[in-house]
Image (cartoon, rainbow, N blue to C red):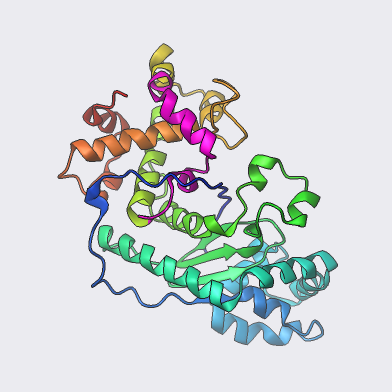
Amino acid sequence: MQKLKFLLLLIPVFLIFSCGSNRLDVDIEDLNVGKVEILRLDKDIFAMDTNKIASYTPQMSKKYGNFYSTFIFGILNTGDVKDSAYKAVSTFIQHPDMKAMNADVNKIYTDEEINKIGDELEKSFKYFKYHFPKQPLPGKVIAFQSGFNYNITTADTTLGIGLEMYLGSQNKFYQMLQWPQYKVNQLSKEYLVADAMKGWIVNSFDNNEPVNNLLNHMIFYGKIYYCMDAVLRETPDSVKIGYTGEQMKYCEMYEKKLWGYFTEKERLYTSDLKQVAEYTSEGPFTSAISKDCPPRIAMWIGWQIVRKYMEKNEKVSLEDLMRTTDAQTILAKSKYKP
């Protein structure tokens, strides 16, 4: 079965824009990545005649490639594209809540809106190609609906976007699901492109490095966020990392103290997975530090280290950065000292 990755990527809004180095302001006008057409699997699924689901398989497989099987098997989790799956697909598209979900998606994601998103992705893909000319871009970008299970998926050369996960924080379904407020605040279309690009970056540079201590985690995600700086030139930092305005202010105000905290008691080098999770997991805050401290705070610090490293080492390209697996070297050469 093809390689399939799911990313749950959750993020809120604040107009603090990327402060990445000017070295990232590159000319992409002459780069051609082709027009990004977002295929609407969600529309095609809900347009099916539920009495003839099996008959759609050839045309759906032709249009969506292996992702159609992935949608049935991995996303709806019903089995392969065989007779046993057809009933589950029919149940999914006839369920009253799924019909209502689909109606909400169609109100927000009109053809015009989808075209705008395609244009934004095209621009980001150009930046990606500029910095990583040897890395593949998505062969297909496919919009789907999973029943509130997945934001972003990557499967081989396909980038999948779960539109029902971007309906806006006031959507009734998020309230019905009783999701925590910090999560609901992040479910708006403003974050869709950033989530999609983060998903593709992680897919392209999966963490094959040894992550046996906190510093390795910090630098790996710092590199991911720096890549987001490179491909999302007009996107607020808060959207990239998923912080509110108050959380961004906290990081900026207490950056020096936060760094001091991590350098105390050899915390940077802890290999205790429970402790690593305290500083890298999603949540309303980092409880080990303070209820005011944003979640995943170690990732934010890692981001600042990588930014400083790239600022201090101008001959290092983004490709060089992503190939560098020695987190300690990046830290040392960053001369990071807030």
- Point out the residue furthest to the left here: 315
Residue 130: x %, y % from top left: 26, 62
Judge by depth and name the residue closer to the eye, 148 or 157: 148
**Rendered position, 22 above or below 244:** below
Judge by depth and name the residue closer to the eye, 187 or 322: 187
Tally the marks. 0
**Rendered position, 187 above or below 250:** below
Q: Which of the 4 image quarters holds residue 1?
A: bottom right
The residue drawn where x is 52% and y is 40% is: 243
Q: Is residue 258 located in the magenta-colored stretch of the structure? A: yes
The residue drawn where x is 23% and y is 58% is: 26
Tell me if 150 is positioned left or right of 324 in this view: right
Residue 258 seen in the current view? yes
Q: Which of the 4 image quarters holds residue 87?
A: bottom right
Residue 246: x %, y % from top left: 53, 34
- Point out the residue furthest to the right here: 96
Q: Is residue 287 located in the magenta-colored stretch of the structure? A: no
Residue 80 seen in the current view? no
Q: Identify the main secondary structure in magenta.
A: helix
**Rendered position, 123 above or below 61:** above
The residue drawn where x is 50% and y is 75% is: 115
- Point out the residue furthest to the front here: 15
Q: Which residues are magenta?
A: 232-259
**Rendered position, 181 above or below 117:** above
Tell me if 325 is positioned left or right of 215 in this view: left
Point out the image quarter for the C terminus.
Answer: top left
The residue drawn where x is 51% and y is 23% is: 272
Residue 336: x %, y % from top left: 28, 27
